[in-house]
Amino acid sequence: MPRFFVDQPLAATDGDIALPPGAARHVQVLRLQPGDALTLFDGSGPEWQAEVTAMGRSEVRVRLIRVEEAQRELGRAITLAVVMPANDRMDFIVEKATELGAAALQPLVSERSVLRLSGERADKKRTHWQGVAIAAAEQSGRTVPMRIEPVLPLSSWLASLDPREDEWRGLLSPRAALPLAGFPQRRAVFLSGPEGGLSDAEEDAARARGFAAVSLGPRILRADTAPLAVLSWLALS
Ligand code: SAM
């Protein structure tokens, strides 16, 4: 059944409602007809069974039939703080991290970044990645799309972290002595570096903010593999 994210709160109502432009466009592309069933979710947790009531040129109307609780989110809120790799590898990370259940993705720029985004270009990319995350949520059955945070320099992001926050902080480093192991907190953030890795000074700055350096084994994983390897481990264990 077609499944769409609706960027407005959904609530029980006697009549039908107009879908916002994003969801309406998807319904039009699929050429759904009045009476066709679809599933809608607004990112607040549950999902709605609905049916199309009217298809216009610019407006699509639906009736919300019933709300259903769905338990498809991870039991932990995991943020991936990723120094952005170049090319379309960020699209890949965003899609796979959404499927695997990450709560948020923090795109970063560091000393050795190949991809250096700021200002309007960074905002445009963020909007694009949020779209990729929504499409992956629709496809994978997630009820809460992964949040894409604004692009930041690594140093600014580290400085913004609350030192008292009750979250586990992991620094993915091929030079770490400790292997990744379990942790009790319900919130965690994992920082991973770019193609050329993080500098020693950047790793020290992360440690000073409470990050524990952990290894993912003796092989060097690519900048898109490392964060997804951690997330797979957490999602499936
Ligand atoms: N020559 C770089 C270095 O030594 O840091 C390699 C960087 S690697 C391509 C990109 C990022 O993936 C690293 O900065 C790190 O965060 C993560 N990474 C790759 N392999 C890892 C491993 N075996 N253990 C922990 N993190 C790893």
Image (cartoon, grey):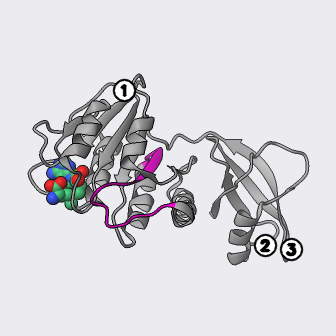
**What amino acid type is highlighted by mark number 3?**
Gly
Q: Is 38 placed above or below 184 here?
A: below
Above or below, 212 relative to 62: above
Regarding ligand 1, which quadrant of the image does it lie in? bottom left
**Can residue 172 be seen by looking at this rendering?**
no
- Residue beneath label 1, please? 185
Residue underneath mark 3: 56
Disc 1 marks which amino acid?
A: Gln
Q: Secondary structure at mark 1?
A: loop
x and y percent of residue 83 in the render? 34, 55
Along the line of sight, the residue nearer the viewer: 15 or 178 = 178
Work out which quarter of the rendered image holds the C terminus and state it.
top left
Name which of mark 2 and mark 3 comes first in the sequence.
Answer: 2
First in sequence: mark 1 vs mark 2: 2
Q: Quadrant of residue 116?
A: bottom left
| Residue located at (37% from left, 39% from top) | 189
Q: CA distance from mark 1 to mark 2?
A: 47 Å
- Which residue in the protein does label 2 denote? 33
Are circles 2 and 3 on residues that touch, CB within 8 Å? no
Magenta stretch containing residue 24, yes or no? no
Disc 3 within 8 angstroms of ligand 1 (CB): no
Task: Inspect the magenta stretch and tell me whether residue 107 lies in it.
Answer: yes
| In this picture, residue 8 sits left or right of residue 220 | right
